[in-house]
Image (tube, rainbow, N blue to C red):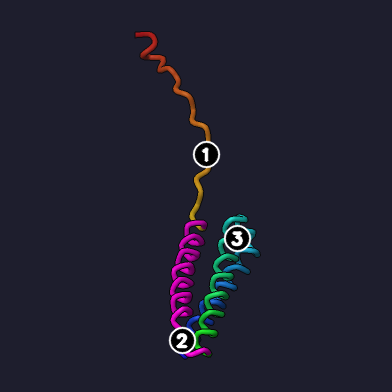
Amino acid sequence: HVHAIAAWVVCALALAMWLVLRVVDAPDDTRARARDLIVVLLAQGGIGYVQYFTGVPEILVAAHMLGSALMWIAVLRLLLSLRERPVTTPGIPAQPDAALASA
């Protein structure tokens, strides 16, 4: 049951993150990544419960492992979407040096 409790905690934290990202008006792509993570976590939880109640069939073990990999992909995509994006500003064109121009 420790595994299930940890999964519920992760789901609650992911939902809290999604709500915070909405409140602070985070970029759309970041909110979409948080939503994707929640969807993957819910699917993973569904597979886990079906697996538990059906006696751990082999195909569901494989699906649960695939879900685990997809969960980590979703986590990393969310993490990478949280980075700051540099503002692109045009550079100042080179100005001729007056001392060099008169030499």
Find the distance from the CA under tag 1 to the CA under tag 3.
24 Å
Give the numbered dot on residue 88.
1
N-term-proximal mark, 1 vs 3: 3
Q: Is residue 82 above or below residue 64?
A: above
Q: Nearer the viewer, residue 16 or 35?
A: 35
Q: Quadrant of the C terminus?
A: top left
> Label 1: few (<14), some or many (≥20) within 10 Å?
few
> Label 3: few (<14), some or many (≥20) within 10 Å?
some
Residue 22 horizontal/vertical position (percent)? 64, 64
Give the numbered dot on residue 103.
none
Residue 49 horizontal/vertical position (percent)? 54, 85
Look at the image and give the residue range highlighted in magenta: 54-81
Residue at image x 48%, y 55%? 83
Type of amino acid at the residue the image marks with label 3: Ala
Residue at image x 52%, y 32%? 90
Residue at numbered disc 3: 32
Residue at numbered disc 2: 56
Determine whether label 2 and label 1 are within 8 Å by CB.
no
For discs 2 and 3, the disc positioned in front in the rendered view: 2
N-term-proximal mark, 2 vs 3: 3
Q: Main secondary structure of the magenta part?
A: helix
Type of amino acid at the residue the image marks with label 1: Thr
Query: Along the horizontal axis of the image, is 99 left or right of 78?
Result: left
Q: Nearer the viewer, residue 66 or 1?
A: 66
Residue at image x 57%, y 58%? 30
